[in-house]
Amino acid sequence: MGAVREQLPEGRYGRSADQRADRKLKIVGAVLGAALLGVVAWIGFDYVGGQSLSAQVIKFKVVSDTRVEVHLEVTKDKKAKGTCTLRAQQTSGDDVGRADFRFDEPVTQVDKVLTITTTSRATAASLVSCQSD
């Protein structure tokens, strides 16, 4: 008795159905991956390029049990207007003060020392968000 072949001879009858399906899946996967990468890049570009107002806390100083002074640096488009929200927290992480500050100046950079009124002694101050109009 001779050996029985269960597969077709290679290269004689073209690609098998499994090989064609694998190729189609690879193509579909590559197209979907490229589309996903494009969407992520577009969202990132829109987020970074679309912000006309940003800020950062340079330093803060707890002045008393009811006040915190925050040195805030705001960078914006010259014509942009907007509001930044700051908060003061105590050691436990609870908010003890929150305030919104408006920036309408026709300049590209604003440095201000702002005061947040607190309900008890704060130990930290931070920037919550900035929104342009």
Image: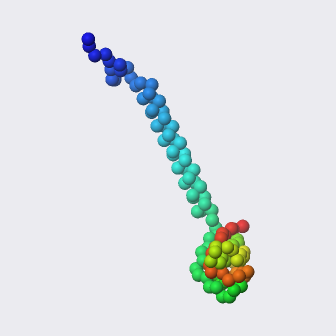
Kindly tell me whether residue 71 is visible in this rendering.
Answer: no
Residue 127 image-quadrant placement? bottom right
Q: How many marks?
A: 0
Q: Residue pushed farthest top?
A: 1
Residue 85, placed above or below residue 16 = below
Decide if residue 75 is on the left or right side of residue 83.
Answer: left
Q: Please name the residue shown 71% across and 75% down the image.
A: 98
Q: Nearer the viewer, residue 101 or 68?
A: 68
Give the x, y percent position of residue 94: 67, 73
Q: Please name the residue shown 69% across and 86% down the image.
A: 65
Give the x, y percent position of residue 72: 62, 79
Q: Nearer the viewer, residue 80 or 60?
A: 60
Kindly tell me whether residue 58 is visible in this rendering.
Answer: yes
Residue 46 image-quadrant placement? bottom right
Residue 12, placed above or below residue 82 = above
Q: Please name the residue shown 39% across and 23% down the image.
A: 14
Give the x, y percent position of residue 39: 57, 50
Q: Nearer the viewer, residue 124 or 108?
A: 124
**Colour logic:** rainbow
